[in-house]
Image (tube, rainbow, N blue to C red):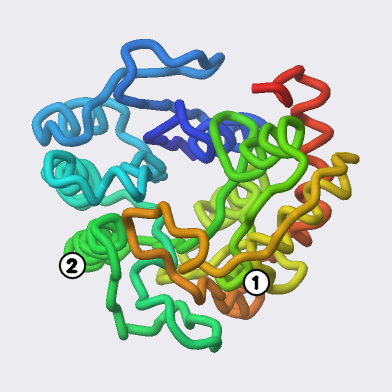
Amino acid sequence: MKAFVTGIAGQLGHDVMHVLAGRGYACIGSDIVPSAETEYPYVSLDITDAAAVDRVISAANPDIVIHCAAWTAVDAAEDAENQPKVRAINVGGTQNIANVCKKLGCKMIYISTDYVFNGQGTAPWQPDCKEYAPQNVYGQSKLDGELAVVNTLDQYFIVRIAWAFGVNGKNFVRTMLNVGRTHDTVRVVCDQIGTPTYTPDLARLLADMAETEKYGCYHATNEGGFISWYDFTVEIYRQAGINAKVIPVTTAEYGLSKAVRPLNSRLDKSKLAENGFTPLPAWQDALSRYLQEIQENGTDHS
């Protein structure tokens, strides 16, 4: 199998390349940066440039494109000056990739988010639920990216995730480690509920999917039960041996956020097992492996 992976300078794209290469597949990675730090075959690509997308991916002629590149700065997406760029990347870029996948007759995996829903209630969101109601600019852009894929291709996987963290980039765990080491008390929201997604675990699942034709929409986060950001922080500090006191606050009490954040990020993942895919391990185990990884590679201070 030959794969083309976008966004390899980010957490997920980096891990997808690692997993695919480990399985012996021919991989080509891309990102907007001129020369990403990677040991894998790499090409610079601006996904908002339709002609470049067509030229570069057609030349690679892959069996599958795993589209990890995205604008993910949720609050910055709310700024009026950023919104055209957000849509150009998350909607236009995705459409450009879907178009070339259709031309080549190859599969596509698109990474999406629970933000396509309204974030209310307590019932886990079903992968085939069509009751979309994004509450912020980022969520709307990711939904429109989904629709670009669905309306263009038949051979696609849409995989919605939440609370992603991995070694190659900034994330909530790294932020909390830094804050916990420099503050005696830490305020963390307790009314936003979901489950973390460890990108190496997700990358393995995406590679599994790429080997099948079980197309459609899926939800994929780690197992281990639904938690709040407060619960997550408590476990981060427990495993890392940090003694900072964690104070639970509501989203309203916390404030600060420009974008509306979902209170209900629960994703129903049962469709994975129903289609023969191995669910991701428990998030507690994933956190343990992540902490060990950043300690071993010396990046737990950044």
Q: Quadrant of residue 300?
A: top right
Give the side of residue 84 with respect to residue 139, left or right: left
* Left or right side of 133 for 276: right
Q: Position of residue 52 (x, y in %)?
A: 15, 27
Q: Residue at x 80, y 51 (%)?
A: 245
- In the rendered image, which quarter is residue 62 located in? top left
Q: Which residue is mark 1?
A: 276
Image position of 137 with respect to 37: above or below: below
Q: Which residue is mark 2?
A: 151
Q: Amino acid at mark 2?
A: Asn
Taking depth in this image into account, of 7 and 141 the one nearest to the observer is 141
Determine the CA span between mark 2 and mark 1. Answer: 26 Å
192 or 265, nearer to the observer: 192
- Indicate the position of residue 46 as horizontal and vertical percent values: 22, 27
User: Is 301 above or below relative to 254?
Assistant: above
Q: Which mark is residue 189?
A: none
- In this view of the protein, can residue 8 be seen by the observer? yes
Image quadrant occupied by the C terminus: top right
